[in-house]
Every structure is written in structure tokens, then in C-alpha cells.
Image (tube, helix red, strand yellow):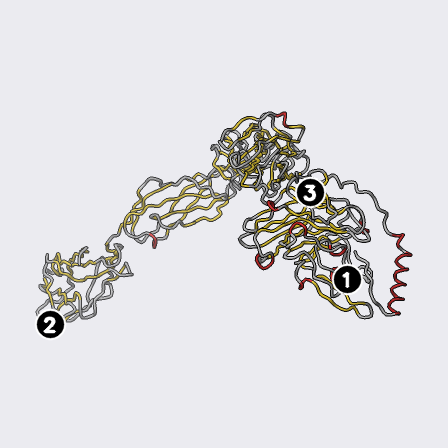
Amino acid sequence: MKITNRICSRNNLLLLLAIFFLFLEFAWLSPAKVKAANENNPPSKIDLSGIFTVPMISNSSLIGKDIVQITPGTTNQKGAIWSTEINKMDLTQDFTASMYLYFGNQGNNAADGMAFVMHNDPRGINALGNFGSGLGVWASQDHGGPYDGIQNSLAVEFDTFVNDSMFDGHFDIDVASGNHVAWNYPGMQDTYIDFWIPLFEWTRKMTHVNVQYPGTLSNDKWRRFEVKWDAAKQILSYQLEGLSKISIPINVQNIFHTNQVYWGFTGSTGSKWEINRVTFDSVPGLVNAEVKETITRQDGSVVENGAPVYKGEELTYTIHAKYLSGKQDWKDIILKTVLNDNVTYIPNSMTGTLPNGNTGVLDDSWWSGQSLALNMPDMNTSMNDVTVSFKAKANKLPTAASVSEKADFVGSNHIASTAPADYVIQPNQVPEVIIKEAGPIHIAAGKDYEVKGTWKDTDDSTNTLYFSLDGTLLKSEVLDNGGSPEPVEWSYLVSKDQLKLGENHFQVKATDGDGASSNLAGLKIIVESPPAITLTDAGKEIPIDFGAGYTIRGSWKDSDSDSVDLYYVLDNNTPVNFAPAAPNSVNKGEEVNFQYNIPAGQLSLGTHQVAVYAVDDTGRKSNIEKLTVNVTGTLTFTNVADSVSFENAKISSRPFFSKRNNDWEIQVKDTRGKGSAWHVTATLTEDFSDSKGNYLKDALMFIDENGNETVMEPGVPIHVYEHVTGDQQEVSINWPTNQGMLFKINPFFHTGDYKGTMNWNLVDAP
């Protein structure tokens, strides 16, 4: 905040006066000043003796040994604190600085704010900028004024007053939204812009980079501020509590012209004021240390990122501090942590481990309720690694509760806090039970059945499992999972004596020690009586002629099915369902007869095995009955005329052949299969003669297809017909009219009625 004189026209002057009087008229509406309640109560602080110094012309002071007051609670003040020469920032090394900032409790009447500054100004520890809007670091806000901000510097401002009026200047015209945080280079001319506001004045504004709006800063609260430097990447990052992190790439030589820079805070007040104070947790380079808190389960797995934890679960808290380097030893360290109310410390579980690996039990007197305040040894390059661990148990809760645990190592010259370790304690978990088989399960009558499944309880090591059948409790059993949250197997053998024919309903549930019950897992067990079958010719070998079918006969019975499918299997071929869904007897369990003719086309010559069985309507299979069918082929006359004759003929002067009459009916049947060869022979057993005693010698002739004539002499078989069996098993023996057996009539024969005897023979040969 700043009030300056300006040369204005008469009209402008009148307007200014009017605004000024208007301002005075309403000044009484401003909030009353209230004494700060927390100005002396920062969250934490370290001893700053010998770390900072104050410029010669400065209103800053050190309160006690651990609070820096940049400006007191009066108007028109400016001040600064700078690191001593030995405590400069070394920009060749990474560092972290953490601190708390306090801006009083003036609310909207506060002015003007503070700035975090790094510099290599030629004035060194006496560097200081302007009052009011200059915050002790920036250049003049006057148009055409000097660029007299702290040179070779970078500043992050925490501005509690917006300078954007003819009375206060327009240094903050670009951030008219209120209290703001931004950064720039105070000693660079490019940071400032001189410009004209039409009808009003020439003025100057500051360029604000990465503007953030934190709300009212002067609200009687300390805010944490952290600065980190990445030397390799040359990036400075900062973060004010409640705002996002800002990162600034810096060319160290272009900005500071050195790797060793002063650092500290500046601040100012104007016609309005505020108390500006700073405390520190860590100072760059003074003590460099790493601290970490890890929480693990009994199996060694790490609990983090909101992982679930269950009632009664035992957790190990391991808090570790490592001294890396520093200008000083880390002194007067107290390890402080406060256990969440939803966990309970396990007595006599706290141990400490030193760099040499020695571990000892630490007395529980360091605890007060849920709070631990443990004196630690001073740490340095030799005493550089200390670990404290203890155990705690998660409490039983009605609802889920988030837990965030952290530890603070509070030393007189360095304060370090671990990152929070977060988890969620779950309310009492209901056990879970499953049965592995989906069911329904079909078993034969008279069989036991073992039901298998798993149970788990993430927060109880023991559960009682209850097994029941059709609503009747069979058994209860206490099982232990050894503290594992993973599923544990169980099994129960349901005996045949406990199972009835038909449907049986098995159920299991688990109950934990708090009475919480799991789901009720169920399995349907169907006890079935498989069908029984009887085959009339079972075990026998049945001979049949080739070309004939075979009829299987028998009976079946089933005591609990409505129907069965009957099958036969011929020589291990595909089963044939010859009686699908054959209905059971009204009185189940009674014999039901069956018969079925296996077609002749399925019975080739040779031996065939026939198996018969039944399958009921639940898929259960009966016994298998078997028999053997022996299919044999025959070659036989199926018809031979008792007498055959030739046509009557008159004796002529020349020989001629008498033809056969139509009574030559000779048939042969061959059931031996295709390709079977056979022939017929005819033998004249008694020569032709009449009643007068006359004989016809050499009268019966056989003429083959080539016209060759053979005299059929008595007692000499003549090959008269041959055949190879094809699709037609039965054939008639016929010859063409001029072939076969014919009767030759010679001129010298006597007239008469002649008879002879002939024998037909069927030969199984080509």
C-alpha cells in the first residue's frame, strides 16, 4: 500500500478529491483490529541462532531464538532477514527448506505482505527494497522511477494488499482479485511496465508470474511453505499450504551470477499494517536428512495408499531417520507421533536399532496414551541411522475409518516429518463361504458324497461352520485360517445313510466371533437309482442265417425315473437308441419288457457282439448285458422239381433234339455273401427205358454255351450250371432253348414212353 503525490489537471484533481472524501466517509466501515491469538504459537520451530542476520536499515527482529518477525504491527515498516555468509544456499546441491508463514489477523485491512527472496545483490546482507507495494524487495512503483529492487534476485511474493488505485498506485493492476502469490525477478527492468491510464495518470505495474489466489492471508493462521531445488535440472519449486506446487526453471548464472546466494524474507507495511513472522523446520544445508514411516502386516506386505486393514490385525510401524550431511549435527531430536484413536499400541513391542545393527527394547514409559515422545541420540556422520519400530492392533469398528499416520523428528536445528502412511480400518467383515460344485450333483443310491468348498474371513482367524441337510443340522465345526485373508478349504462327507432317494439340499454357513454370519451356500444332491436291464439271451452265442435279422428281448426296471432310453451297440459301433423315452411302469421298479429286431442289413457274415443297456431321464446308465450273434451263410437248393420232362416227338429219319417242357423248376439260394461261387452237376443214375424193356442209349445230352455236346452217361456227373452270387441271393437255373440238357431222338429209337433217373448236386466251388 502506498500514497503518492501526482500532478493532475483541475478536473482530475476535483475527481480525486471527491473519491478521497468518499473514501473517508466510509472508512469507519472497515473491520476492527483484533489482536492476533496465534502470533506466538507456530506449528513448529527450530533454533535460528547464527543462521540469519538483519540488514542495518530494517525493522525486522528475532523473537527469542526461533521466531523471525519481518515487520512489526505498525505502519510504514520494511524489513528483511538474510542467511549469514556460512548459511548461503549452495545451488550446486539439492536442498529443501520448509517453514511457516504468519500474516497477522487484520483480514481485509492487512498490508502489505512478505516475499521469499534468493539474491546476490552487491549489498549482501544489507540488501533491501521499497516500502508498501515493494514488500522490501521490488523496485519503485513510480512511473519512470528507478529499478531499485534487490539485484540479481528471484522473489516469491505473498501480497496481502492489491495496489490498484490512484491513491495506492497500480503495481498490482493485473491481479485485482485480492491476496495473491506470484514470482518474478526484482532486479530486472523487464519485470516492470510503465504505462498511462487515460484521464488519470502515468503509473507502473509489476508483471506477476504464476499468479495464485490463497484467499485472505491475514487470518491468524500459520501456513506451511516449502521450497525445493533440483540442482541437476536447475528447477526451483515452491508450494504454499493450500495451493498447488509451482516450478521455475532458472539459469543460475544469468540470474544470480554465482552458485552461492543469500536467501531469506523481506516484508513491508504502508498506511495499513500486519504482523509478518516466519519460523523454520529446515534450513538448506544445515542438516540434510531422510525420514520415513512404513507400516507392514504380519506377512511383511506394506500397508499404504488407503489399503484395507481389518479389526484385530497386527501392524508393525517402522520409523526410520537417516542423517545424510550438514553444517551441523542434528541435535536434541525428539521422535513424536500420535497413534490414531482407532488403533491400540501393543505393550512392550517398541524397539530401537542403531547404525551398528544393535537392537534393544525401548521402555513403554515414552508413551502417554496414544502419544509417543521419544528422545533420540544426536545424529551425525557416524550416528547416522536410527530405526524405531513398534506394533499396534486395529480396533473393532462399526463403520470404516480412515487412518493417516506420520511421525515428526523435532530437533533444535532441524524438523523433519515423514510422509503420511494411509490405510482404512474396515468394519467387522462378514465371512464368506462357497461350495466349489455348482450342482445339482447326481449320485447313485448307496454312495457317499464329499462336498468341498472354501471359507474366508479377513478379520477373524476362527469361524464356526454349520453343515445341514434338508434343514437339519448335521455338524458344527470350528476352523482356523491362521490369520490369512485368503480362502481356506473345507470339506464335509455326506454319508449314504444321510441321503434319501431323490433331491437332498445341503447347506453351509460360517459365523465369526462377533456373531456375523456369512451367506448360506447350498448344493442340491440328487440320489438316483440307475435302471437295471435283463437280456433274455445274455451270455449266449446265437446262430442265425445270413440275411436274417435278430430280435433282442428282455426287460428293464427303474425305481425313480419316468422313462428310459434303450440302446444296443453292435460291435462297438455307435449306440442305437431303439426305444427312446420308453415309459416306466406306473408302479416304478416293476419289470418292463422290450424287444427289437436288429435288421439283417446290419448283420454281416461272422460273429457280432450285441450290448444292450438303458439310460434314465437323469442320464444315469444301467448295467450292460451282452450276447453274441453268429451269422453263417448256406448254399442250398430251395426248389428241385420232382420230375421234369421233354416235349413229345415223332421219330424221324434224321436225329433231332426234343426241347424241355416248362416243368424244369430248379432254384438255388446262396446266403454266403457276394462273390461266392458255386456250380451244379447232373448225373444220370438210371438210363432211359420204357415199359417194354427198350432203352435209349446216349439220348440225354448237355449242350454248353459254345454248342459243345456231351453225352450224359449213367454214373458220370456233368457240370451243367455255374454262378457267382451277387445282390440276388436266390436264382433259378435256366438255360437258353438250344442249350442245357436236351433229349436227342435218333431214327432207330423205338416208339414209347421213356423214363430215366437223374441226380442233381450243388457244389460249393467255382
Residue type at mark 1 is His
Residue type at mark 3 is Thr
Could you tell which of marks 2 and 3 lies nearer the N-terminus? 3
Cα distance, mark 2 to mark 3? Answer: 158 Å
Q: Quadrant of residue 188?
A: bottom right
Q: Residue furthest bottom?
A: 653
Q: Residue at x 19, y 66 (%)?
A: 646
Residue, disc 2: 655
SS at mark 1? loop
Q: Position of residue 71 (x, y in %)?
A: 75, 47
Local packing at callout 1 (Cα closer than 10 Å; few below 14, some 14-19, many 20+) is many
Foreground residue among 222 and 560: 222
Residue type at mark 2 is Pro
Is residue 451 shown left or right of residue 419?
Answer: left
Q: Position of residue 719 (x, y in %)?
A: 15, 61
Q: Residue at x 82, y 70 (%)?
A: 199
Local packing at callout 3 (Cα closer than 10 Å; few below 14, some 14-19, many 20+) is many
Q: Which mark is residue 170?
A: 1
Residue, disc 3: 279
State yes or no: discs 2 and 1 in contact (Cβ < 8 Å).
Answer: no
SS at mark 2? loop
Is residue 683 shown left or right of residue 21?
Answer: left
Q: Residue at x 56, y 27 (%)?
A: 478
Could you tell which of marks 1 and 3 lies nearer the N-terminus? 1
Q: Residue at x 79, y 56 (%)?
A: 1
Q: In the picture shown, does residue 197 fall above or below 638?
A: below
